[in-house]
Image (cartoon, rainbow, N blue to C red):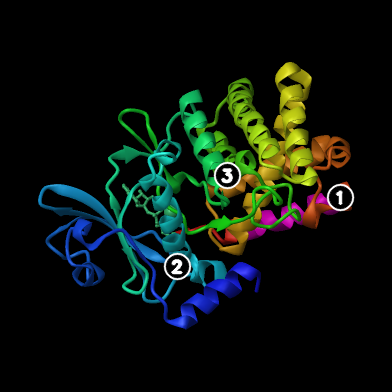
Amino acid sequence: MNQRQLAQQQFEQSGENLVVGSLQACPLSPEQLAQTTADCDYVVETFNSGLTAEVFRIRVDGRDYTLKKKRPTARVSNLDGHYSFLNEVQRRFDIQQQKDDPSSAADFECIVSTVYADYHLGIIVSDWIEGEPVKQVSSSLLSQLFSTLSACERIGLFEWDLCAGNLLVDEQHKLWLFDFGYMYRFEPLNELNSNGLDAPLFNFCERFETRFLSGWLLDKELSHSEALAVFKNVKHEALRVLLQQLRWLKNNGASVAVMQAKQALIDTYQQALESQTKLESLFQLEMFRSHVLDIEDDLDGKSCTPITIKRVETVLNTITEHYAELKQQGGLFYHNQGKTQQALIDAYRGKLDLVIQYQLNG
Ligand SMILES: Nc1ncnc2c1ncn2[C@@H]1O[C@H](COP(=O)(O)OP(=O)(O)OP(=O)(O)O)[C@@H](O)[C@H]1O
Ligand SMILES: [Mg+2]
């Protein structure tokens, strides 16, 4: 167990409760909300996809809210899944403090307001967001997303799960974030993410590319030049936020290691934005990285989709055609490190079989 999991286990065993918001704002009694089923007359819509929670759209006195209700037993067996509801209530508490403070509220306006949450009762009530999944990766979307993630990082929160199901865009093209089951604490001045300095691979732009963009590009079947243009814009917007981050880190006495890592990212993105060859090469390297990471997630959870198949096919193609480049640029990390081209091809052919075997509702 890592430190966070230990602390969450201690909290769970202590019998202590955590409540966010005030009772007056709660649309129905918390006890009644905790008993909610899809059959209740105030339930308008039910989202049953969650592993640790059920989500209901409810309507009380003409106003809509979202009720996230903890499942009695999570459908995931791993520890992070087990603690994800507690984790979300903890993060809602942290973020709501910022939203309630006029000096920081604007930085967190893309994050849904928590109306009321009670960890022991297993309920989180939020405003209902009238929105749709992300359809276009526009500059406005990227700038809202990256600025919000950066504001979270300044208060020591790193978001891991920027998947399509966790992003909504409303009619005014405003982005909304609302699922914080996998947003973890870290020390922004001394660490790069909630793994400390051990995993510099992970940053806000990488998280977006891995959990969302890389799959979205495969799904949309954009041409190479269209995909490259989207990627360039992602880097452009990420660079702007990284430059702000670096300034903030400097002003607040961040460690040399953190500033060097940020500077390295800035240099890489800047060079890619200035040279088409470097842009092409970064696109290949980072999509490879994102596919490799997301394939492992899908295999772990036995939750593969047709996109996972496409991811493995892309990885196989890249290994076959650009092995030397990948190796030289540090694209072969973790389980792929030190492997020969043939060993990698064999490994990913094996994964392809598994991915086909683990197709959801297949
Ligand atoms: N405040 C909200 N407004 C509108 N829709 C919401 C809101 N919160 C959640 N939803 C909808 O419900 C879905 C599931 O919510 P959420 O992502 O919070 O939980 P989950 O991912 O299903 O649960 P778990 O964390 O257990 O996997 C979202 O993809 C979104 O469509
Ligand atoms: Mg979710």
Q: Nearer the observer, disc 2 or disc 1?
A: 2
**Count of numbered marks:** 3
Give residue 343's position: percent from left, percent from top: 85, 54
The amino acid marked with disc number 1 is Gln
- Circle 3 residues within 10 Å: few <14, some 14–19, many ≥20: some
The residue beneath circle 3 is 154
* Mark with earlier residue (2, 1): 2
On the question of residue 68 being in view, the answer is no
The residue beneath circle 1 is 342
Give residue 307's position: percent from left, percent from top: 55, 45
Q: Residue at x 66, y 29 (%)?
A: 243
Q: Which mark is residue 86?
A: 2
* Mark with earlier residue (1, 3): 3
Q: Secondary structure beneath disc 1? A: helix
Q: Which residues are magenta?
A: 342-355
What secondary structure prevails in the magenta region?
Answer: helix
Q: Nearer the viewer, residue 247 or 129?
A: 247
Give residue 25's position: percent from left, percent from top: 21, 56
Q: Quadrant of the N terminus?
A: bottom right
Q: Marks 1 and 3: CB-CB under 8 Å?
A: no
- Circle 2 residues within 10 Å: few <14, some 14–19, many ≥20: many
* Mark with earlier residue (3, 2): 2
The amino acid marked with disc number 3 is Arg
Q: Is residue 66 magenta?
A: no
The amino acid marked with disc number 2 is Leu
